[in-house]
Image (tube, rainbow, N blue to C red):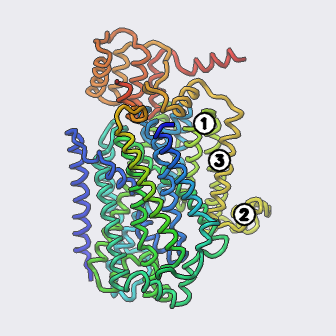
Amino acid sequence: MTGRDRSNERLVALFLLGLLLFLPPLLLVFNRPDRVIGIPALYLYIFVVWAGLIALSALISARIGREAEAPADTAAVADKPLEETSRA
Amino acid sequence: MLSLPVIAFVSLAYLGILFAIAHFGDRRADAGRSIIASPTVFALSIAVYCTSWTFYGSVGRAASSGVGFLPIYLGPTLTFFLGWIVIRKIIRISKANRVTSIADFIASRYGKSFELGILVSVIAVVGILPYISLQLKAISASLSILLAEPAASLPRPAGGGSVFQDIELYVALAMAAFAILFGARHIDASERHEGMVAAIAFESIVKLLAFLLVGVFVTWGLYDGFGDLFGKAEAAGSLAQLFVMEGIGAQTSWLALTGLAMAAIVVLPRQFQMLVVENVDERHLRKAIWLFPLYLLLINIFVLPIAFAGLLRFEGGAVDADTFVLTLPMQADAPLIALLAFIGGLSAATGMIIVETVALATMVSNDLVMPLLLRVGGWRLSERKDLTGMVLLQFAPVILAGIYWKGATKAGALAALSAGFAVWFYTLLLPSFARSGWISSNLIEQGPWGLGLFKPYALFGLTGLDPIAHATLWTFLVNVGFLVGVSLFTSQSIIEQTQAVQFVEIYKSTTPAGRVWRGRVAKAELLALLARFVGDARAEAAFTRYEQELGRKLDRTATADSALVALVERQLAGAIGAASARIMVASVLREEMQDIDEMRRRMQD
């Protein structure tokens, strides 16, 4: 299994995690009238999860970048734009 | 407070900067030193997603439904996590086929079908035009707020005097000038509009900073941070109900909006334009998958605080919540912040108008007007008001099936879009006519001819959903149902098969798109055809490039080989769209592709 496939798997998993966390029924766990550190629970939950998911996507993105830069990697060759590979 | 000359001067200065940036971007592009070849600019340009609806409307929605506005931004966030996989594939395919618009993309996938190109263009124009006029309205309404005094007794935006209608006209003219200068400038539509992209990226920065400024001013200037603000809202009693989502209706609309927004971020014409057509390098997506969601998060942080501050300070709904972004700073006697907020709203509106106009214009000229000029005559676009862009979202299944399922046929795509359009018309548009009194409201209450089963807001007895969620559900069911069902029971022509394989297996193929053309044509004739659409210089340059790659001079009078024909077709597709390019190439070849299809059909019989 190449690194590229793993990155794609991680992104799909992140997407599914996001669906799970942002939609009912899990969302409704935090659908309560009380406030946590002064902020309504539901608002805090959504924004914290949102920021967390973005952080994870940035990590995965950085990893894709490192793999693309790795020389003599088959994944990196496939990554090149179409015109370059076809001209080569 | 603020006077009209001051506001006019600042607005004109802002638009002037916009033109200057676009001009500079185009100059640099011509010099081969692009200023938009950066992942950050790419991510910012996608933020054209945030229109004046985001800038003013989110607060209004938050004031009535709490978190109800967030799915519009959570959906695209989720889509972008998959962007590296799905959007990159769409970009790769589009570059190989020199796709110029979303209509072109769909038409090209399903056998370069000009019927599909027309259908998609018509749906897009019908769905989007009202939104463009809404953006103009937002500009004039915000201006009327800014000029109103005293601030304490701000009225809801009135219908607008003549001066405000004039403003709408001036802004529309300025936008038209911008679109012509920086949008329609290039004959080859697949060439990027670098100046426009640079200007849009700049607008995205302006609207984000303006909104953050208002948010910080409200949260820490008028109150003592988030805790203080939400605490006062809780103490006020009735506002605390906005802390939670109430009822099943709120949950279903949460689901529906998330799904709609997930599709919208790719299939709205302006998004497709920025994401795919204007994309410089698909590797820029790598950074955008987190940077664009981060932008969405930042521009939404202060929506709820502003909404609550507005509700606390303007009791009894004396001021429209859609205007809180402007009215809060004005009431607190901070005209400078109000002015900057106005500029932010202006940038959000103008960005949308510019990109949407350019995207629609490309689509209309390449996929609507060109094929009609070439093939059939007499088509009139009827103008409609009060529509919702939801109808565009049914492009999503056709695109997704198009890039992952080879079996999706043109007949399936046509059936899906037509049936989905019909359902949308019946479940959303027709009842809106009834509600505005154009037709009898019996339709909503009792159903057509008293048939309760067919009530447009409760089709087949499905109740408990709000109208948008209801229409979304039925439109998608019918759309996907027809796409899959019809595709499974119809067959593809040869050109459809070729395109289907090429789209689905884009990562496998190393040769550029193209299909073997049978038929004979002299090279000089092909050159003349190309020159008619892209100009002599460009056509000659394309041939020279081809000769260089081949490593030898071509005999211009000899018959062209299929590779050269495919090259010309691709060049033409970039200028006039895939469906039109195919027709033009077929017209100069002695033998048309349809003949091959017919031959195959005869052999099968």
As drawn, the label of residue B588 is: none
Residues packed near mark 2 inside 10 Å, few (<14), some (14 to 19) or many (20 plus): many
Image point (38%, 76%), residue name: B325
Image point (40%, 10%), residue name: B559
Calculate the distance from the C-alpha at mark 3 to the C-alpha at mark 1. Answer: 16 Å
Q: Pinpoint residue A33: horizontal percent, then vertical percent.
A: 58, 81
Q: Earlier in the sequence, mark 2 or mark 1?
A: 1
Residue in the foreground of this view, choosing between B448 and A77: A77
Q: Is residue B166 visible?
A: no
The three-letter code of the residue at mark 1 reads Trp
Q: Pinpoint residue B161: horizontal percent, then vertical percent.
A: 38, 75
Marks 2 and 3: same chain? yes
Marks 3 and 1: same chain? yes
In the visual, does B32 lie left or right of B527?
left
Q: Which residue is mark 1?
A: B405
In the visual, does B295 lie left or right of B447?
left
Calculate the distance from the C-alpha at mark 2 to the C-alpha at mark 1. Answer: 33 Å
User: Which quadrant, please, contains the C terminus of chain B?
Assistant: top right
Callout in the foreground (2, 1): 1
Calculate the distance from the C-alpha at mark 2 to the C-alpha at mark 3. Answer: 18 Å
Q: Which residue is mark 3?
A: B479
Q: Element under label 1?
A: loop
Q: Element under label 3?
A: helix
Q: Which residue is mark 2?
A: B458
The three-letter code of the residue at mark 3 reads Asn
Q: Is residue B576 above or below residue B81?
A: above
